[in-house]
Amino acid sequence: MAADIDHREVVPSLARRATDSVHRFFDGDVFYSFRRSPVAMAAFAVTLLLFFVAAFAPWVAPHNTDDVTTLNLMNARFPPWGFTDPFGTEGVAQFLLGTDDQGRDILSAMMFGLQISLKVGFASVILAAVVGTALGLISGYVGGKLDSVIMRIADIQLTFPAILIALLIDGTVAGLLPRALHQDLKVYVLILAIAASQWVNFARTVRGSTLVEKNKEYVQAARVIGVHPVLIMIRHVLPNVTGPVLVIATLSLALAILTEATLSFLGVGVPVTQPSLGTLIRIGQQYIFSGEWWMTIFPSLALVVLVLAVNLLGDWLRDALNPKLR
Amino acid sequence: MAKSPLLEVKDLRIEFPTRRGTLVAVDGVSFDIAEGEVLGVVGESGAGKSLTGASIIGLLEPPGRIAGGQVYLSGRRIDNLPYEEMRKVRGREIGMVFQDPLTSLNPLYSVGRQLVETIQTHTDLDEQAARKRAIELLGEVGIPSPKVRIDQYPHQFSGGMRQRVVIALALCINPKLIIADEPTTALDVSIQAQIITLLKRLCSEHGAAVVLITHDMGVIAETANRVAVMYAGRLAEIGPVGEVIQRAKHPYTHGLMGSIPKLSHATERLVQIEGSMPRLTEIPSGCAFNPRCPKAFARCMVERPDLMQVEKSQVACWLYDQAMERTGSDG
Amino acid sequence: MAEAVQARRPDGAVPLLRVGGLAKYFDISPPFVTRALQGSGRSILRAVDGIDFEIETGKTFSLVGESGCGKSTVARLVVGLYQPTKGHVEFDGVNIAGLTTRKAMEPVRKRMQMIFQDPYASLNPRWRVADIIAEPIRTHRLIEDNRDVLRRVGELLEHVRLSVRDGEKFPHEFSGGQRQRISIARALASNPEFLVCDEPTSALDVSVQAQILNLMKDLQRELGLTYLFISHDLAVVYHISDFVGVMYLGRLVEWAPADEVFHNPQHPYTRMLLDAIPDLEMSGRPRQAVAGEVPSPIHPPSGCHFHPRCPFANDRCRSEVPQSLPRTGGQVACHAVEEGRMPAGERI
């Protein structure tokens, strides 16, 4: 059965390891459970579509809303195609979902806004995941006083909502730096603020899993062999605690996008020149009472769909990686 | 056999449908138990002994299902009963003792409350009488000062004492049959001896039959009247305990007995059965034991042996079929 | 070094491992705030409470006892997974209990390895078998060239009767017995002289247990290994051991050559354990059901820990801790034996 395997090749080459892992993934339980879950597949399709649209916004969008020179105030506040606004203006096919008060095409603005939202979301989740996983790993593996210190910091962190931290950091940065620089740094401030509110989740979960793994015999075996504690953490414990990290990362992504939208809605988010979905909703909501609903409804719908899809994906992943529910 | 047996299992087959095809975990297992008899079911992990026990009481975990065969209790077929009917049978006629006493006791209720509730569900005793009966039972299974202990919670009992409570719980319905799945495995040797003695005494006093599922030959040797040896979901050998242990017929049983270290004589090397039990996905054709069997021959590879009478035991092995044919033609 | 010379015994046998006054206490008290609120003091679990034994080179010394007696803690103290509270662990004349840094331990690490109980937890599920076995070699840089490392891994796999090609598989592709072989191959990778085996067969089926026990005996003969073997199964211990120590609630109550312990047991607890073994010979010997249970190690009985379950206990046993006294080939700690109150035990 294994006669075709080269006898000298005790450990396969890197290339074979890679193809092996791909094969094992598609043959594995996670992929099987994915194929069996229509909700997961639909959520994945929607997420993928939105990611694609966001990534290729400059090429896919009908108008380049980033370029201010193409804007024409004469085009402002057109209703969606096929609708008539309270003032009798009819929508045109050129602006499928209508335009905003600056004359920007809503559909295109949404695509660019999605890009910003996802950029901020991914960046903050990655930052939170890296910091949280590292701190959780150290806290759980080393234990003792260091563990207490890290976990108390996490507790204190939890008492501040993300919005408060964002306002705090934003205010500090605004006070310390010149205004122009502050505008440039706004996105990073936002990422930092959201990451600060999310690392605790990662740290706590990873610490919990680490406490379990640390007492397993393969870790003790590594200690008896004399492996350096840092290497034990990285090579032995880390690969075995990544499952939950992936789940939290997915669920945090949805939360990060929402937080970003909230902060942008409140005006402490990304600068108006680069509107995210939250900024679009904020701009649009000023016009909702005059009957120009499209400016806020379409970006809101996009936000809801995105967050729902990512959340459903995260839920499925949590179940798929949990052997007890299988 | 003048009387019909208490429990009769006929040609039991348990399947697990998986995405890689259907696994047959138990295949063509038949045995019966007379009243008051203790039948030991031994086998290594994966032999299907626990599944057999679970299927008798209708507690097979899905996706596992009984795919064939029948189970009769006192002549009444019970394997196809609807859930509610089966629950009544479990409550009134069959008791259970599991390996881990913690899983059979609810940690949130006192031991007394669990006993009283079980007694009241299955009899028409009032609370006072049920409590009195519960105290009697705790005393009977050897729990000291039962009047105090009855109001304590499972975590206040030690492992051995918990197993006694579980036995009391199984006995409070006066079952005709007790299924004991590895009842002593989680316990220390000295406690194990106490529980075995208790189980034996209670069976003879209450006249209940016991299916004792275990991997420990020592426990079987001390407790069982008859023993069934399972391998890869099939019965390899079944017979009186002395016969099977001291004059094992099936090569697997023989190897199994030889692989147990003994205190009576020091040996340099233990008898070892090469290889390991096949996974359910890879059960060989013919006799399931053929790849590990030192005596296997051509017929074992293709044709599956059925149980055949050899002296006082029944053995599923072609070695004995040959012998019988030869003696048959000689005579 | 003077001590090492002293350790040489008149019969010329050199102990590879000497354990003296070894103790490990665990502080299991609730957190400070809870303690302060409840007014409760600290509670100390004396998992191992001052034990002495020595293991000769090339021999197998087994520790037996019921759960909670501290035998696994001894194993972990010996390999340095725990720091002892008191006492010393002398390996080849060097007290390793005093070596607190990883650097200082390194020369000993190569010479002493451990085999664990649970074959499903002792191998990292995300590593290939070849990488698992190569870990000690790579950690100590015993072989530099990677091809040579893999060649050595192949040899080790064949040594434990697995195939060279098994190296590229993952642990989940193996049965429990095969995993235990992988564990043994990993333990042998750094050419150790001494193996600590913590219940290596208790998670295995009997037929597989026989394979592993035979393999361990073969390896001992081929490589001249010394074993510290931890088990609760007396029959297994009798089969594999040269010397046996019996533990009860953190203390070593008796140790002697295996034949002595099994055929001429002195301590009442040893006798009780032997009586409790199921009788496979069906000789009709009544199995003695012993009264009582192992008390909690947090609040052990005064004096001799065994006195509440002992049929020979008197007032002295209840108040005074028995000291180890010489017996044939070993030691026993029992007042009744010392005073000659014990009836002669007839065994097997």
Image: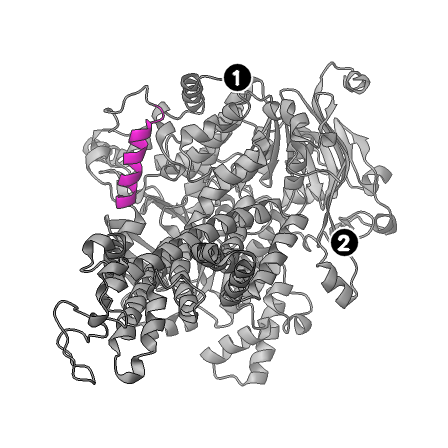
Task: Check if mark 2 and mark 1 are on a common chain.
Answer: yes
Q: CA distance from mark 2 to mark 1?
A: 46 Å
Report x, y in % for residue C238: 60, 32
Considering depth in this image, is C158 or C295 the residue closer to the camera?
A: C158
Classify 10 Å Cα crowding around label 2: few (below 14), some (14-19), many (20 and above).
Answer: some
Q: Chain of mark 1?
A: C
- Residue that mark 2 sits on: C308
Q: Element under label 2?
A: helix
- Residue that mark 1 sits on: C222
Give the colour scheme shown. one colour
Considering depth in this image, is A6 or A55 the residue closer to the camera?
A: A55
Classify 10 Å Cα crowding around label 1: few (below 14), some (14-19), many (20 and above).
Answer: few
* Disc 2 residue type (three-letter): Pro
> Is residue C334 visible from the viewing direction of this image?
yes
Quadrant of image for the N terminus of chain C: top right
Q: Element under label 1?
A: helix
Stretch in magenta: A10-27
Report x, y in % for residue C73: 66, 41
Report x, y in % for residue C220: 55, 21
B221 in relation to B104, above or below: above
